[in-house]
Amino acid sequence: MAKKFITIDGLKKLKEELNYLKTSKRQEISKRIQSAKELGDLSENAEYSEAKEQQALNESKIEELEETFKNIETIDDRHSKSNVVNIGSTIKMKNGEIERTLTIVGSNEADPSEGRISNESPLAMSFLGHKVNDKVEVKTPKGKTSYLILEIS
């Protein structure tokens, strides 16, 4: 499996989520299962079936997160603070009269509505390795679009 990149904040959030799923969520589900068992016949007990399904989903998510931890690499702040666009860089760019600011993050943290784009996206891949004042052409479904890099932080 290929390495996935993640910021320190993103790693912290993943660790918090895993901890929650392993502790609080497991306990909550366990209590629901126990309560449902006390209702009697398990073969026709919808509460029991639902709680067991939630347990399976929770365990699946825990397994998925633990697998993710095996294949992630934390984005080094030194790379994000250089004069070259890297994973972790925040770039201010201009397309015509429109200025945008985007941060290039790992795919696990991407949220385009917040200006956080995946390093695996065509847009981010086009910017990687470029410097301030570089003109970058990005291939889009509507054709090529040119951007001018104004700042990198």
Image: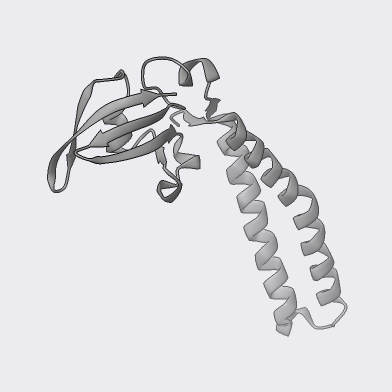
- Measured as percent of width and height from the top left, residue 38 is found at 88, 78
Compared with 70, 132 (above or below) is above
* Residue closest to the far right: 38
Q: Identify the residue shown where x is 49% and y is 30%.
A: 5
What's the colour scheme? one colour
Look at 45% across and 34% down and name the residue there: 105
Q: Position of residue 139 (x, y in %)?
A: 17, 38
Q: Is residue 153 above or below residue 38?
A: above
Q: Quadrant of residue 93?
A: top left
Quarter of the rendering occupied by the C terminus? top left
Question: Which residue is farthest left?
Answer: 143
Q: Is residue 143 above or below residue 8?
A: below
Left or right: residue 57 compared with residue 2: right
Camera-side residue of 72 and 82: 82
Please tell me which residue lies in front, 11 or 24: 11
Residue at 42% of width from left, 43% of height from top? 115
Q: Residue at x 75, y 57 (%)?
A: 25
Please give left or right for residue 99 compared with residue 113 in the image.
left
Residue 31: where, in percent of width, then height?
A: 84, 66
For the N terminus, give its image quadrant.
top left
Numbered label tally: 0
Can you give x and y, in whole percent of width and height, for residue 122 in the image? 27, 37
